[in-house]
Image (cartoon, rainbow, N blue to C red):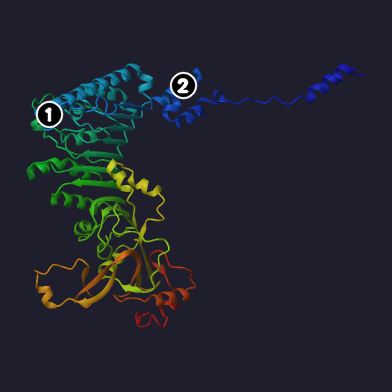
Amino acid sequence: MPSSSLVSGARTTASRPPRQIQYSLQSLPLEILDLVIYHLDRPAAIALARVSPAFTAPAQARIWRQVNLSVNPHYGKEPRVCPHEEESRGHRDWMANMLYRASCQHDEAMAARVKTVMLRADERRLGTIEHIKLVSRPTSVHAVLQFLNYASPNLRSLEIGSYYPVVGDWDDETLDLNWLIRELSFPLLTHLRIGNDSLRFAQTLAEITRTAPQLVSLDVDLQHWLKSPWLFAEPGPLRHFPRQERTRIRKLRLKFGDAPGAASNNTEKNIEPALALLEHCPDLERLTIQYDGSLRSAVDRVTDVIDKHKTLQRLFWPFSLRSMEAYVGSRESASGLTVIVIYTCDWSDMLERIPSPAHLESMVLLEPYTKRPPISSIQPTIAQAMLPSLSNAMRRSRQLRTIQTVHTLENDVDKGEIDVFDRLEAMDTSHTYTAYFTSLRHPSSSHELFYARILLSHTEISDTPVPHQTILTAAIPPNPLAIRYKANDGTLREKVYRKEDEARWQIFTDFQGEKVPLEVLEEMRGVEETEGEWEGRGIEVGDEAWKSKHLQPLVPSI
């Protein structure tokens, strides 16, 4: 018979609760811990490195993944309390002295920062650097390039901030020229941003893109004076500047302009690097162009690239809708554009200058052409005849569905946001639509009925032929509230509009050059047993709807 002590011991062991395992960050496998720390921001990684020695090494990799080699641009500036009167010589001398002192203090701070980072960096830390942000100053160019040379094998992203020189001209100490002399190479670099005035020599852009063969995203600002290589005082070891080669760039923001105060031939030399780069990006998918100039030849070369790029899907056009119609709309295009962002347009452009690339799905305006009405606005009850230019645009652009006005994007473009299209996709744009386009198609024929609902603050009041004597009299200025168009019978007609106090939704229809009343659309919807409005392009509608008695005069062949 077992003793009571053994029995009680067995009961105690059986009744003891199972031991709970304590989990913590320190108990995680190193691979899992690295993944967790990878998603921390830099301040959080610095705080984690101070918690325990076990986290120091993994956190160091996150801390050194991004390195900032820049100083606040306002560093060294002091309050401007001038003891002299404005526009006096004493005031000018005082201002020059203040700017010089601020520039010297900024240079010293920049050199000290680069030196500090260089002293802390070792081979292991340099191997973890993926992103570098810097501003090139004359006193730190060589130190910055030395650091870039050490970090270049694993570098994925590089941002060179804008630098506006205050005193003197520092041709010998430019970042781009020394970049070429040192023959740097970035085998894994995929994103590069070059700020205004960071490059001084025009042809160095070709070499920079050549040294980064994996580059797919480039944001470059060349809207400043670019020097030619023969203006360099001492030739040095660099004997020639390279030509632009083919790149793999898929996302490009290119900002350039005419040389200020220069002759046309110098201006063409100033913008040639930007145009050459644009022409050597055959895989381009997203393009943001900002050209501040007046050369027609430059715009023609840009539009040639747009027309020939079948891979180009999204475009930011820096001009008005009227200029786009003049440059792009008059030629055959092989472009695969699906989204176009345009600065502005006039109210009449919405009726007669809609762009018509074959694959276009949406257009976005940055500046509103009219004020949006209140949500409770009265819906239109009648349809208006569509201008031939609008129906032709819908016929060519069979995917075009909407037009939006998103004025908040203008700030992103001005700030240099290369991902302006990603920003647009992430926004709530349900309240920004100003036009909808729909078309109904017969399944076994080429007949197509076009329907457009557009927000306008102008209402049509007349549609009359233009008198022959008015056509011959060129001295009479055109009516700003009128649109002239060529009708299907070849006659020149004029629609006159009246400006209203507020914008209203207006409906325009077209079938074989004739207006289709809304009652016909309602009957077609009833035959098809469709509730609500049709939305989309190329909606197939059956024979019964097309053979309605109201449609027989319009479609006798069906």
Q: Is residue 258 left or right of residue 30?
A: left
**Splitting the image into 4 quarters, where does residue 540 fall?**
bottom left
Q: Earlier in the sequence, mark 1 or mark 2?
A: 2
- Can see residue 494? yes
Vertical relation: 489 (above or below) 483? below
> How many marks do you count on the picture?
2
Q: Quadrant of the C terminus?
A: bottom left
- Number of residues whose C-alpha sits closer than 10 Å to that of mark 2, classed few (under 14), some (14–19) or many (20 or more): some
| Quadrant (top left, top right, bottom left, bottom right) of the N terminus | top right
Q: Amino acid at mark 1?
A: Arg
Instruction: Give the SS element for disc 1.
Output: helix
Residue that label 1 marks: 92
Please tell me the numbered disc located at residue 49: 2
Camera-side residue of 51 and 159? 51
The amino acid sitting under disc 2 is Ala
Front tag of 1 and 2 = 1
The quarter holding residue 325 reads: bottom left
Q: Determine whether the residue tagged by mark 2 lies in a helix, strand or loop.
A: helix
Direction from residue 88 to residue 499 in the image, left or right: right
Residue 213 placement, left or right of 469: right
Circle 1 residues within 10 Å: few <14, some 14–19, many ≥20: some
